[in-house]
Amino acid sequence: MRHKHSKTQWIISGVLVLLSVVMVVAGIAGYWMRSNDFTRKAMSDMRTYAVMRTAAGALIDQIALEAKKAAREYADANKFSRNARAAYASEKEAEARAQAAAQYAQFDGINTAGINARIDELQAAQRAYAELESREKAVYAQQLGEIRQQEAAHEEDLASLTDTVEGEGEIIDEADLEQTQEETIDYSGFIASDALLALQADIHPRYQALWTELVTTLTGLTEEMGDSVKKPILDIVYQHNSGFEQEYDRYETMGALSNFSAGEGLQMNLARRGDDMITIGIGLFILSLGLFYYKPLVTKLGMPRLVILAFLVFLCVAAGLYGISVPAMVGNVLKRTGMFGVLALAMLPGIQCGITLNMGMTSGIIGGLLSTLIALEYNMTGWGAFFFSVGVGCLFAVPIGWLYAKLLNRLKGNEMTVSTYVGFSFVSLMCIAWMMLPFRNPKITWALGTGLRVMHNMEGSFGSILNNFLSFKLFGVVVPTGLLLFFFLSCAIMWLFSRSKTGTAMIAAGSNPRFAEAAGINVNRMRTIGTTISSVIAAVGIIVYSQSFGFMQLYSGPRQMGFIAASAILIGGATVSRAKVSNVILGTFLFQGVLALGIQVANAAISEGGLSEVMRILISNGIILYALTQSGGESRV
């Protein structure tokens, strides 16, 4: 059906397209301006003005201190009361500070060539020191890592970390784990080389030469004042790995832009905001397309998915404005899509066969964990270990799924509640089993006592084997080709099965049991097949997840997997009675995209304090709550 576009849609979309073109063109111009001679000279001048303002700060402090001292002497001579003396001194100090700050706010007519030269020399000395220090610390960290690997201390630290998490039943996020791993590097034993010490010693005379130039240029400065502002000046002159935006913002916050004319300031602002304007322009163009094709999109995707997709686009634009690497985040979303996708696919046969959302898929997950533990027990590596885990995991999941299906067939109508309790109970039961199973490999067992550790490193077995297979980088986006291919292959197999004779009968039994029975279909048998397939896919999904994550989590780790998978497929457009493969793909991408980008944008917007864990819980549980509300009010005929 062809949708007609209203006059209002044409006008609004046209205006948005025009604005987007203007923003993109202006942004490209601003981005290009970063490399021209004017901008390079202006950035150098901003740096110089920032240094001069910082140096003048020492002089302003001295002037304010002398004014306060003189005010106290005057108050004592005129026999002011104690309170009046303090108030008078504070008033005169503030007045003197304000007058001095206004006096040194502008540096018109001052020749800054000598200061610029000294700053360049100091910056070169700082850069040489920072680069050599970075190389030496990298070597030290590598040697420290090798020592820890030999002593297995790294795995002990990770296991101790997860002890505090398992009681909450939460899944450790990748960003949290990477941050913890970075914090384990202790540089207290790092010893600088003679070459590094020599470069460090070279910084002081360079700074002294700069301060001497400043004393000559700014009337009132003395050599003694240099020590009080040495650190802030060194921080201004050079910061490791700082880009154009970081340097500009650092100088602008110190008022360095006030020394330029209005036209020059506008050009510098355009150069600074060039990439932001391009991002906004792209966002406006996408918004114009969304408004122009609003009706077809609502018909095709539905309003909830359209709103979430629009929110995802908004997060991408916000990420660009906050300086977050959008290509890196897109690569992370692709990785998480493949990582969680097979687990979300495990919900599909459960819905199609009539047991609704299979919250008890964690019972199938246990089969995948068991097979992976066997591979780790016998030190299996590479593709052999991966395919062994998948094959044996499927064998474990078949009887588990069959028994689980028999239970659900006896409790028709209460499947969602029963499956949730079954999943939680099975995970709790396995918490005891993990301490009693006869595994002996010291890599997976506790160093003291018996039982399996909470978390197991997959690096020595088949960690990231799918992620790295045929992976490539495109426009800064790392594409985990093997991981996505495995996910799409799994979806294709499930799509083909749903069109087979058995698959068609299973869908018919799930959508309308009475009609299926009248047609001669054994509904209980179809429910058993669907539940068993769901358990098998869950076993494979946890293996794919573990190899992508790099670690396998036992005990309470799998507890929330059912909710994450359910929310993904529901957000993709499925209901408790109908679901398609497309719902799995779209839903997983939207869910993981909003989750990954939302946390980063929220942390960037509210920088005070670490919100990673708080925002992860709020966003993930909020999306799950929304998704589950979409399943209400539906029933099978």
Image: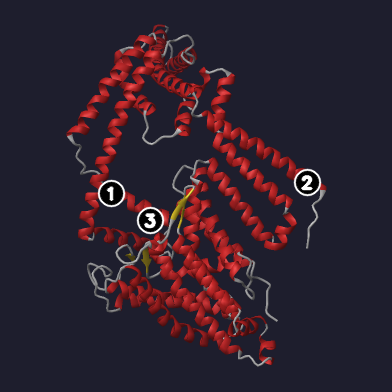
Q: Quadrant of the C terminus?
A: bottom right
Label 3, label 2: how far apart the Cα atoms are = 49 Å
Residue 409 is situated, as x and y percent measured from the top left of the image, at 56, 87
Q: Is residue 603 left or right of residue 636?
A: left
Looking at marks 1 and 3 on the same chain, the residue that comes earlier in the sequence is marked by: 3
Q: Secondary structure at mark 3?
A: helix
Where is mark 2, residue-wise? 10
**Alpha-carbon neighbours of circle 2 within 10 Å: few (<14), some, or many (≥20)?**
some
Where is mark 1, residue-wise? 185
Q: Is residue 320 left or right of residue 427?
A: right
Residue 545 is situated, as x and y percent measured from the top left of the image, at 43, 66
**Alpha-carbon neighbours of circle 1 within 10 Å: few (<14), some, or many (≥20)?**
few
Q: Quadrant of the N terminus?
A: bottom right
Coloration mode: secondary structure
Q: Which mark is residue 177?
A: 3
Q: Amino acid at mark 3?
A: Leu
In the image, residue 55 sits, relative to residue 306, either above or below, namely: above
In the image, residue 311 sits, relative to residue 566, either above or below, namely: above
Q: Identify the residue at horizontal 61%, vertical 37% (top origin).
A: 24
Residue 571 is situated, as x and y percent measured from the top left of the image, at 60, 64
**Number of marks present in the image shown:** 3
Q: Amino acid at mark 1?
A: Ile
Q: Is residue 440 left or right of residue 329?
A: left
In the image, residue 52 sits, relative to residue 533, either above or below, namely: above
Q: Secondary structure at mark 2?
A: helix
Looking at marks 2 and 1 on the same chain, the residue that comes earlier in the sequence is marked by: 2
The furthest residue to the left: 194
Looking at marks 3 and 2 on the same chain, the residue that comes earlier in the sequence is marked by: 2
Q: Amino acid at mark 2?
A: Trp
Label 2, label 1: how far apart the Cα atoms are = 58 Å
